[in-house]
Amino acid sequence: MQKHKFPYNWRLSEAKFTKDKGKVFSCFACGGGSTMGYKLAGFDVIGCNEIDAKVNRCYVANHSPRYNFLEDIRTLRERERERERERELPPDLYNLDILDGSPPCSTFSIAGNREKDWGKEKKFREGQSAQVLDTLFFDFIALARVLQPKVVVAENVKGLLMGSAIDYVRRIYKDFDNAGYYCQHFLLDASKMGVPQKRERIFFICIRHDLGINFLKVSNLFNVEPYINMEFNEDPIVYGAFADYKGRAYEGRMRELFELREQGDIALSEAYKKLTGKRGFFNQQFCYEDRVCYTLSAHLDSLIPFKQPVYLSTSEVCNISTFPQDYNFCGLSPHYICGMSVPPVMMAQIATRIYEQWLSKL
């Protein structure tokens, strides 16, 4: 079996973070999945921006950021316009190697309402302010235009490449170009990167025009882009490698449904139909010991073991998402924090490629 570049089972207390590869600032930071990935790759993550006070407390407890902006990203961007006053942004933010961000993506998810929710201002669990989620990506690009980091990395859901949403991708490319960046996107599968879950996400990886010119290659008949290899093929990690079945036991209806379960990709919809005679609307998927888990979401029952009637344990959730075993969830749901975050090992792989192929050669 191939040795994995980064361990999926690890502890913050034992990690060696060299902080010698460059400076990173993380936006829409949630509990710090991306942050831990950059740290594993040797970067110094100097701060974060997050709108949700609860998950921000979690981030601070685990990462002790030098700069912590608990506010709307639009407020952070507006600080640039007050540089003559006390609210000037720290000089470190104008000398970044990487500006990172995972703009909220539920309006583009294939599991959501998609077009029905586009352009609507709502209050979401991600924060207390009313926001139009599908425009936050462009606020993030506007911040990049102000700060001018060497590289920008933005993560989002696979649904951004599907149907009418492709128009947003075209605008993303245009806005990055106007901000001074070459933009490329890659659809990556975490299960090929040393992460024990089949999690597909799109990553926009952008390099500033004055730096990217050093890496230009013809990518196809029509485009010339800064070359970077983002192909991964690490051995899969199956659920049985870390299954412990120590999660909370099922009760009531959930236990009844479990007893009627059948093997298949969708866990309980057919069982619900047998039990009630009605169609069930379930997104649960089974974890099989001989297979890689499907995508972990923020819900307690998004992934459930086929073998025993229990929810995933905290240790299993951490392994599936490559969060450290000693992560302090500050009383919040591990499913929520991990399901909302980029798996640290996934980001560590990307950050390593960026350093080795671009930043180390500048």
Image (tube, helix red, strand yellow):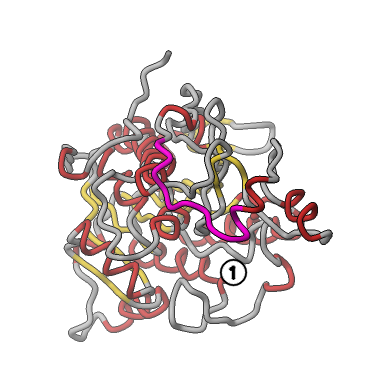
Q: Is residue 250 magenta?
A: yes
Report the side of 216 relative to 63 (left or right). Answer: right
- Horizontal placement of 41 versus 250: left or right? left
Q: Choose top left, top right, bottom left or bottom right for residue 344.
A: top left
At x 30%, y 32%, the residue is 361
Highlighted range, magenta: 244-255
Estimate the x, y position of residue 224 in percent, counting from the top left.
Answer: 57, 37
Towards the viewer: 316 or 153: 316
Q: Amino acid at mark 1?
A: Asp
* Image-based side of 316 in relation to 278, left or right: left
Of residues 106 and 74, the one nearer the viewer is 106
Location of mark 1 (residue):
134
**Residue 7, image x, y percentages:** 32, 31
* Residue sitting at the far bottom: 85
Quadrant in which the C terminus appears: top left
Q: Give the main secondary structure of the magenta stretch.
A: loop
